[in-house]
């Protein structure tokens, strides 16, 4: 007999994919919806054979229905969370329902003796506000507009669009010149070699030095030059010089 997994919030995007994967792996799945009329929406989203899928009504904002939802289940995937509507200014308007709903699920799971409960969360719980200048990993496009760079970027592998985006003051035209030079002359061995590219000056290199990475080629360090030649180089005596 197949083990049964309860997935909360069956109409949600993540929950829907959890249901699909569980059914494909042979589990019996029970999922919750707040309104019985949404059962067909869940089944339509899952497609395929839904004989092992059952849908029950349970709302995270109410106690009713949770004991019945969890009864007989081996595992619980708690994916649902009340999101509210529109811009919510009071954090407790979201935190309290999510917390209390989770406690309802956990109490019902403990009473039913399930083997394991898996809880998920949303990036929004830790993400800076969208109006903030801070950047999080689910705001990839804000990095450029806020002047924050994802770098360092490899000048030997990145395309022109990436170079233009990540290197300050380079622009797409000069970034393409970097790529063209690389194709014609081979990989750069140091950031300073960018000066060989038309339109790239020392100031631009220095401004971006910490954002430049050299991939695939060992960086070349120029030897320090002293009065008698490169430091560490063997000394050379003039022909005929005597040794004392």
Image: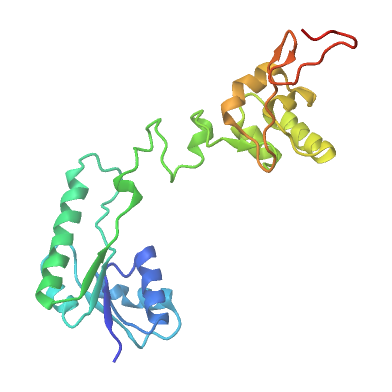
Q: Quadrant of the C terminus?
A: top right
Q: In this picture, is 183 found above or below 96?
A: above
Residue plotted at (18% across, 76% down): 114
Q: Quadrant of residue 88?
A: top left
Q: In this picture, is 222 found above or below 62?
A: above
Residue plotted at (13% across, 61% down): 103
Q: In this picture, is 184 found above or below 102?
A: above
The residue at the far right in this view is 240
Residue 40 x, y percent position in the rendering: 35, 78
Which is more toward the observer, 127 or 35?
A: 127
Q: In this picture, is 145 found above or below 59?
A: above
Residue plotted at (34% across, 42% down): 127
The residue at the far bottom in this view is 1
Residue 43 x, y percent position in the rendering: 38, 78
Which is more toward the observer, 233 or 119?
A: 233
Q: Is residue 73 visible?
A: yes
């Amino acid at each position: 007999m197949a083990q049964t997994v309860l997935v909360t919030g069956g109409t949600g995007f993540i929950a829907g994919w959890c249901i699909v994967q569980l059914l494909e792996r042979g589990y019996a799945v029970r999922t919750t919806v707040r309104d019985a009329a949404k059962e067909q929406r869940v089944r339509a989203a899952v497609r395929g054979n839904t004989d092992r899928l059952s849908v029950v009504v349970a709302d995270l904002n109410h106690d009713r229905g949770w004991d019945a939802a969890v009864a007989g289940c081996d595992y619980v995937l708690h994916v649902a969370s009340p999101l509210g509507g529109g811009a919510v200014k009071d954090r407790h308007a979201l935190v309290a329902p999510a917390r209390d709903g989770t406690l309802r699920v956990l109490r019902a799971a403990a009473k039913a003796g399930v083997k394991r409960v898996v809880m998920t969360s949303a990036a929004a719980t830790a993400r800076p506000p969208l109006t903030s200048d801070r950047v999080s990993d689910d705001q990839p496009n804000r990095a450029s507009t806020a002047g924050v760079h994802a770098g360092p970027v490899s000048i030997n592998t990145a395309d022109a669009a990436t170079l233009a985006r990540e290197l300050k003051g380079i622009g797409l035209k000069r970034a393409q010149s970097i790529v063209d030079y690389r194709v014609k002359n081979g990989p750069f061995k140091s950031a300073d070699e960018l000066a060989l590219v038309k339109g790239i000056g020392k100031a631009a290199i220095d401004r971006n030095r910490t954002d430049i990475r050299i991939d695939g080629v060992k960086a070349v360090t120029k030897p320090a030059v002293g009065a008698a030649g490169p430091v560490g180089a063997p000394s050379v005596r003039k022909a005929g010089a005597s040794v004392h």
